[in-house]
Image: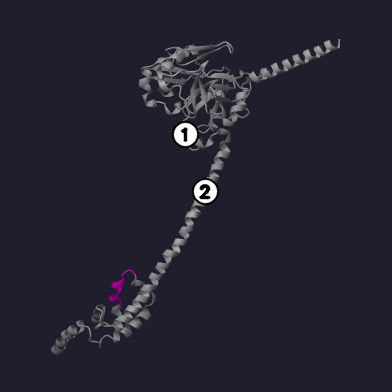
Amino acid sequence: MRSLKIFAVLVALNAGAWITLQEASAQQVSASFRLFYDALSPYGTWVDYQNYGYVWMPNTDPDFSPYVTSGHWVFTDDGWTWVSDYPWGWATFHYGRWDYDDVYGWFWVPDNEWGPAWVSWRSSPGYYGWAPLRPGISLSMSFGRDYRERNERWIFVRNGDIARSDIGSRYINRTNNTTIINNSTVIVNAQRDDNRNATYIAGPNRADVQRVTHMTVNPVVIRDANQPGHHLSNSELQIYRPQIQKRNGNGQDPAPAKVAKLSDVRPASERNAGSRQQQPPTLAPPAQAQPSQPRAVTPSATRDRQQQPRTVTPPIQVQPSQARTVSPSASRVRQQQSRAVTPGKTAQPKAVTSSVGKGAKQLPPKVAPSNRGQSPQPLKVDPSTGKGKQKQSQNVPPPQKVDPAQPNKKQDEKPKQREQ
């Protein structure tokens, strides 16, 4: 009896544990739109958009384009699957659809169906191309001839580059889209997922890709992650893809905790200036403040280092200027003294001849041509002293008859005196 009781207790415990695990598992794979609202709020802005309800506008670079920027394709059992480099890519590239606003740029409309990528595929001779499916476009519509996405929404690569991890550097310039699209056909290839009761757009056929790339394309295995996010390693893609319900368990429609008015959202053209500094978006506000600190510090530090030698060099440049302001005055005094004592210089006879009949006041202009740039300074600074010294120097030269130029002038003067 005792053994039976123990057995019954063990069975009960195991049953309770099994029920708990099932409940926990159910909680992990079942969620509502509130999951998107809460998980994406740090990375962008929720807006109540006309005809769509709540849409999400990401904080991204100005050239952002869904299924183009920061990501690449991998082939899985569900078809070509987009693996994004953004931390929020597990949601926005596998649930819902993208649409474009001419003023505010790309925005994401949530939906509850998971898929490897919600895009339309095309094939042209030598090229593969894809474009995001707009909200409300079904698979059957996307496969039809009547469905045409705008040419600038398409992105093309050479068909041999479709499986490259660096596909972002292989995109064909979109100016060639019109020619490529006119020579392309829609790829009609659907993949059925019985476990999730869903049908996906699988993209280019695996055999066709192997033929053009001359390489074997091994499928990447998808594993369900237990929390929001995704990770690719060792040919395995772990991604969070729970079953999403549009309403809460109580039947109410959830709403984002914070919803902005469309009029309060800055246009894409105005967000371009600082959008590159906002990655990752969760760190956008501090990221704009933190880079400004080193930018404010490092230039000042470099300027201080550059200004230290510059603060030393000005005195070196001032010293010669001081010597120049001093040397002219000293040189003029010395020149005037030497002219008064030494009669052999050619400048003295000119000064003496100009002084005859007019006095000594005209001598400074004759001395000035030796230093044209500095001659006004001694005349303005110390005219009285200069005149006194010049008068003394002028009284001495007349009786001296050493210079050969002086006798000639005196000989010229003698006949004039005789004529008088």
Residue at left 41%, top 16%? 211
Residue 326 lies, with reference to residue 237, above or below; the image says: below
Horizontal relation, residue 329 to residue 345: left or right? right
How many neighbours does mark 2 have within 10 angstroms: few (below 14), some (14-19), or many (20 or more)?
few
Visible in this render: residue 389?
Answer: yes
Mark 2: amino acid: Thr
Residue 126 falls inside the magenta stretch? no
For the residues bearing labels 1 and 2, Cβ distance under 8 angstroms = no
Image quarter of the C terminus: bottom left
Q: Position of residue 111 (x, y in %)?
A: 57, 19
Q: Secondary structure at mark 1?
A: helix
Magenta region, main secondary structure: helix
Q: Secondary structure at mark 2?
A: helix
Horizontal relation, residue 331 to residue 83: left or right? left
The range drawn in magenta is 364-373
Q: Return the residue nearer the eye: 391 or 349.
A: 349
Residue at left 14%, top 87%? 415
Horizontal relation, residue 248 to residue 361: left or right? right
Residue 365 falls inside the magenta stretch? yes
Q: Residue furthest right?
A: 1
Residue 388 lies, with reference to residue 188, above or below; the image says: below
Please give the label number shown on residue 231: none
Q: Return the residue nearer the eye: 101 or 115.
A: 115
Distance, label 1 to label 2, CA atoms, is: 30 Å
Residue 164 occupies quadrant: top left
Q: Earlier in the sequence, mark 1 or mark 2?
A: 1
Q: Position of residue 380 (x, y in %)?
A: 37, 74
Q: Position of residue 405 (x, y in %)?
A: 20, 81
Residue to which mark 2 is pinned: 298
Residue to which mark 1 is pinned: 269
